Amino acid sequence: MGFLTLSGGIRMPLVGVGTFMLSPDEAQASVLSAFAAGCRLVDTANAYMNEKAVGRAVRTSGINREEIFVESKLWPSFYEQPDGVERTMARLGLDYLDLLLLHHPAGNYPAGYTQLEAAVRSGRVRAIGLSNFDIPEIRELLRRCRIRPSVIQAELHPYCQRWELADFLRSEGIVLQAWYPLGHGDPGLLSEPVFRELAAKYGKTPAQIILRWHVDAGHALVAGSRDPVHLREDQNIFDFTLSRPDMAEIRKLDRGRSYFNTTRSMLNSYAAFVPPVSEQK
Ligand SMILES: NC(=O)c1ccc[n+]([C@@H]2O[C@H](COP(=O)([O-])OP(=O)(O)OC[C@H]3O[C@@H](n4cnc5c(N)ncnc54)[C@H](OP(=O)(O)O)[C@@H]3O)[C@@H](O)[C@H]2O)c1
């Protein structure tokens, strides 16, 4: 397993399991399979409607809480609710969170960030960050914040490599954590000839080559799967590194193509939508 260190000496695993689009039962099973495969980071969100199940998996895993890195994301319509963080903690059933992000740059996100800062001060949350924020919004937030974001989550994969964002975050000492690291499972991406060739060369699968590319490029990542075999593969990428020429070949795949484009009107609708979080099992 690989780790990096956030400010304040917080150790964060490079590779985690994500739970987007998983039902509570699927999320619980997937997180437990990932833990059995050695994974120690799990990513959820208010809007995934599976925080209770993720918390159950963490609490029943038999693994010491301090060994697991738990992250969630505050949804925009909760940014102005003073108990947004406490309700998140209550659903997870955990005493503290390792990382809490603002999910989108929508609604009153400065108020949401103030909530995150207060949660750090009260000891409920160890580190904070942002998701889906672009460079101008991050710059603006860095100017106003009292506690700097440690992590930015962004869509990133070989078809959408985001070098400008990566370089900016590196210069600011902020960790970039990729979401959709496997292109959301796009068979077109996974079957690119370069990945098949490198899989044969390194004795790995195409998915493992892509995940290792993220790590060798300096990114952390959260990958999702319902398949225990895939979850094991996704953790098993720390016994090799890609050569510079192989990294350069993968760089050629960049076409600035994201699978998830958020428009201003989508952000407005996120700010207005209240996920029925209390209804989850
Ligand atoms: N911040 C945000 O706004 C945001 C948005 C979206 C996602 N996320 C986070 O990012 C995480 C990852 O997103 P994602 O799961 O949608 O996309 P992903 O990790 O890029 O891809 C998941 C897909 O890849 C397949 N897969 C996983 N491991 C594989 C392997 N070893 N071999 C072959 N196929 C494999 C899975 O299929 P199988 O089930 O068959 O393995 C699934 O279809 C989410 O769970 C969430 O935590 C964040």
Image: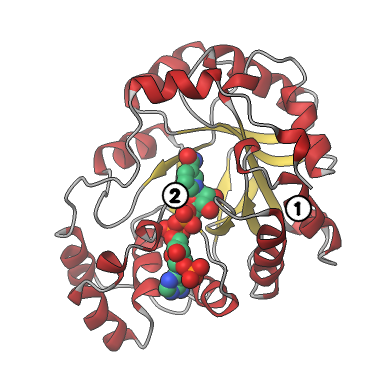
- What residue lies at 36% left-to-right and 62% top-to-bottom? 216
* Residue 222 seen by the camera: no
User: x and y percent of residue 131 in the render?
Assistant: 48, 34
- What residue lies at 39% left-to-right and 68% top-to-bottom? 212
SS at mark 1 in the image = helix
User: x and y percent of residue 152 in the render?
Assistant: 47, 37
Q: Amino acid at mark 2?
A: Trp
Up the image or down, 108 lies above or below 247; here it is above
User: x and y percent of residue 125 in the render?
Assistant: 73, 34
Q: In screen coordinates, is 93 left or right of 209? A: right
- What residue lies at 22% left-to-right and 82% top-to-bottom? 197
Image quadrant of residue 86?
A: top right
Q: In screen coordinates, is 232 left or right of 175? A: right
Q: Within 8 Å: ligand 1 and the Cβ of disc 2?
A: yes
- For residue 53, the mark is 1
* Residue 29 seen by the camera: yes
Q: In screen coordinates, is 45 left or right of 61? A: left
> How is the rendered protein coloured?
secondary structure
- What residue lies at 83% left-to-right and 43% top-to-bottom? 94
Q: Amino acid at mark 1?
A: Ala
SS at mark 2 in the image = strand
